[in-house]
Amino acid sequence: MSADVRPIRTAAEQALAEAFAARAPARAGDPLASRREAAFRRFAAEGLPHRRIEDWKYTDLRALMREAKPLAGPPDAAGIARAKNAGAALRGVEVRRIVLVDGALVPELSDLAALEPGVTIASMAQALAAVDKEVVGLVGTVAPTDDVAAALNTAFMGDGVVLRLADGVALTRPIHLVFAYTARAAAAVFARSLIVIGNGARATLIESHEGPDDLDYQVNNALELSIGDDAKVDHIKIGTEGSRALHISTLMTALGARGELNDLSFTTGGAVVRNQLYLRYAGEGAAATISGASLIKGRQHVDTTMVVDHAVRGGTSRELFKSVLDGESHAVFQGKIIVRPGAQRTDARMMTRALLLSEAAEADNKPELEIFADDVQCGHGATAGALDQDLLFYLKARGIPAHEAEALLIQAFVGEALETIANDDLRGALAEAAATWLEARG
């Protein structure tokens, strides 16, 4: 069975169609074959997202993605060796490391021994090969989206991580998913992970993405996170991709009754980055805190797009995003809060702030509310501006050099978002990463 594709317009779209057709024999016996083909038909009908699509208005992927790189193959021994020090920025944080090299889980680099009772960690590719019924049933269903980039991930997804926590399990240390690109040639990685958190469970999850500066590789990563009733999850995503990389990441989350999610994205790397979040409230009384901090320079383009779907009563959400822009960089924030009919007693607030360090930098902020219930408290706000000259004068008047005064103000600006991280060591590591970025700025 093959997908019915329309004529493809761009070289990148044509290359993706050829790559999907070439993989037809591999889909024989694949339990997700029909889902993959349906996803690719969606892409074939719409093509790469572009500025005429409202959700992609500021990130014209059709223009930014001139070519589609060949699909990455399994990592070789040299590539695995190069990944041994991946995730070094968190060396001072006690974590359980799970390492993926070029999108493939590498057991010899991963800490898979002595797992807590009720915790299982496996390869997505192996779970699908074994026709794991729970995995097959959940992939693509946790928080469905019609986004074309997410559909491409479904069509091409290779390996990833399947993490399951049984009811009541509390992880003793954070799990760090390390995504490292180590191939010598530019390729495309489509990784897909599934995390299922049982009722009443507790977990801190970290994912970091990194790669070399000299390659224009491409990453399309997706993670589905199902959070059970009364469960609590802290999720931190750290993006330090190479300076020429294209990175698209989609987080699809369902939050159970009285569940709690604390999510933070921290981005300093990548040429073109889009972080997408689709959060669905699946149970009453749930709460989410969603934060982000981006520090970008040169001609970097970082897009944060999220949809928070309050579908049931009594949900609470707080969103706070901070962007620091230097050079000719471009930051985009698109946040939408939806309150469905019947989702009474919803309390949702969203704020995005951009700090422009250069006259050539650009920040586009588009917060939105769609409210279909009457007993709610919702609000949003957006600001963009330069450093406060009065505060700068105050610090310099007390003998602090100008560049140090600027750095202090920038660190304080970003620190408000980082304060949402409960783990002291992790919060300190990200604060140090922000300081390193400021030092490199000069």
Image (cartoon, rainbow, N blue to C red):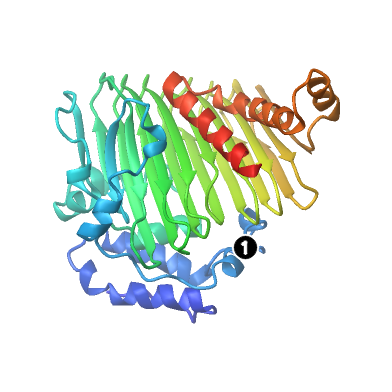
**Is 440 rendered above or below residue 405?**
below
Query: What's the amino acid at mark 1?
Result: Asp
> How many dots with numbers?
1
Q: Is residue 33 left or right of residue 338?
A: left
- Give coordinates of residue 148: x percent, y percent: 49, 60
**Residue at the image point whose x is 60% and y is 50% from the top:** 302
Q: Is residue 228 left or right of residue 357?
A: left
Neighbours of disc 1 within 10 Å: few (<14), some (14-19), many (20+) = some
- Give coordinates of residue 3: x percent, y percent: 36, 73
Quarter of the image with the N terminus is bottom left
Q: Quadrant of residue 118?
A: top left
Question: Between residues 32 and 268, which one lies in front from this camera angle?
Answer: 268
Residue at the outermost bottom position: 7
Quarter of the image with the C terminus is top right
Q: Is residue 142 visible?
A: no
- Give coordinates of residue 359: x percent, y percent: 80, 49
**Is 314 rendered above or below residue 292?**
above
Q: Quadrant of residue 282?
A: top left
**Residue at the image point whose x is 21% and y is 35% from the top:** 111
**Residue at the image point whose x is 26% and y is 18% from the top:** 168
| Residue picked out by circle 1 | 60
**Is 70 rendered above or below residue 219?**
below
